Amino acid sequence: MILISAAALLIGCMTFYLGNIQSTRAALDGLAESTPVTVTVTSRDGGRSGGLCIDTERFEALTAAGVHNVRCHSSFVGAYGETARAEDPFNGGDTSIVGANSMEAAGLDPENVRFQDGWDSSFFSGTGNYALVGESYAEKFSLKPGDAVTLPVYLVEWGAGNNLNYALVGEMSLEIIGVCSPEGAADNSTAFYMPVRAMREETERAGVDFCYQSLSCVLDDPMDLNGFKHSLPAMGFLEPAPEGAVTYSGDTVVIDDEMFIKTAGRLRQNLSLFQSMLLPFLCLILLLSLLTVFLTFRGSRREMAVSLSLGQPKGAILGKYLLFVLAVDLIAGIVMFPVICLGAGLSPIAALAVCGIFSASMLLGGSLALLLLLGFEPMELLTKEEN
């Protein structure tokens, strides 16, 4: 029972140590999900992330650079009412249209959006000229899902000197597939929400250079953060210059990596420490196994001496006691197996590996201990004990 208890305790120590290595490595591998690194395109000073003019070349380069969860938007303005159509020159019209690639990018609350049957938020990833209409705008012009509107639209962009310009795209038709209430929109003045890809196609078809007004994404592999940063100049992006002039050209990125770097550094340091101490720890387990077996069987030296004096080979005696040690390891392993799996959270395969490593240590330590115990002259020991 003493040997079984000691074996179970040593298995528990090994489980704790190897479990720490596994959990630290798992935390490091899952850090990209738990602590994502966000890349946001901003103004030159890094202070503005919307209302930019991000050209399609930079957009394509960044979104193809090992990123996911891309969020982007752009916008049109148009003239739907008679008064707005009569503006000359055009000065903003009466209709604002946001093009986005997701509900989040559009700034919409899903709970306050009512889709026509057969439609859902996935339409934002499409290319058709379908749109959600703002409730107040729908009431003003008596619009409802299923209706179609046609109006001249203009791409909103920042020109030289940061002046707001409108580039004529032409007549565009939109089919309404849902309504969003005012509290469901980030900007209650927006009339329509449509897929940004459809907006880009309309613009390029008209021969106008399209630009995105916002863009953010999350790195797939933050562990290669330095490599990603080194690739940014080739994409046409610069580092923020807080003291620089405020421009909206969308050629600057801000990377939110401070928390990731700190956490990754701490986890790597812990993992390196655990791994560097693994060999000394296993040597300690081996030493404790040797000591445990030696102290346990020290009182059996008389039985060993009797067996030797009767002509039994040392190898046979060694094998008998090692078989006993192996049986103890097996019992301790069976007792500790559910503790390893449930308490320490290791997989069954990892639990078997722990038990296997411990059994190897126990057998090696037990062999050395038994060899020490058998290193005596049988008759001398028996004579000494009788006296």
Image: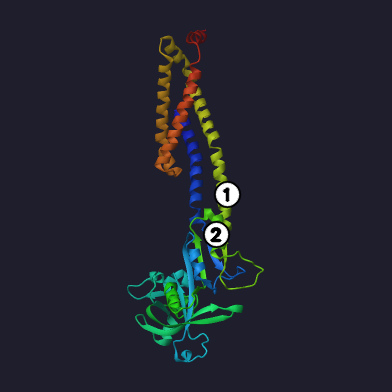
Name the amino acid, label 1: Arg
Q: Nearer the viewer, mark 1 or mark 2?
A: 2
Residue 43, placed above or below residue 174: above
**Between disc 1 and disc 2, whose residue precedes?**
2
Residue 234 rendering spot, x and y as whole percentages: 55, 62
Residue 79 rendering spot, x and y as whole percentages: 46, 86
Residue that numbered label 2 is attached to: 231
Residue 345 rendering spot, x and y as whole percentages: 44, 45
Q: Which mark is residue 266?
A: 1
Label 1 secondary element: helix
Local crowd size for mark 2, using a 10 Å CA cut-off: few (<14), some (14–19), many (≥20): some
Query: Disc 1 and disc 2: Cα gap in Å?
Result: 26 Å
Depth check: 303 or 181 in front?
181
Label 2 secondary element: helix
Q: Residue at x 42, y 30 (%)?
A: 329
Furthest residue to the right?
A: 243
Depth check: 370 or 268 in front?
268
Name the amino acid, label 2: Ser
Please identify the quarter of the rendering in which residue 198 is found: bottom left
Q: Residue at x 57, y 78 (%)?
A: 159
Residue 204 rendering spot, x and y as whole percentages: 45, 76
Q: Residue at x 40, y 31 (%)?
A: 331
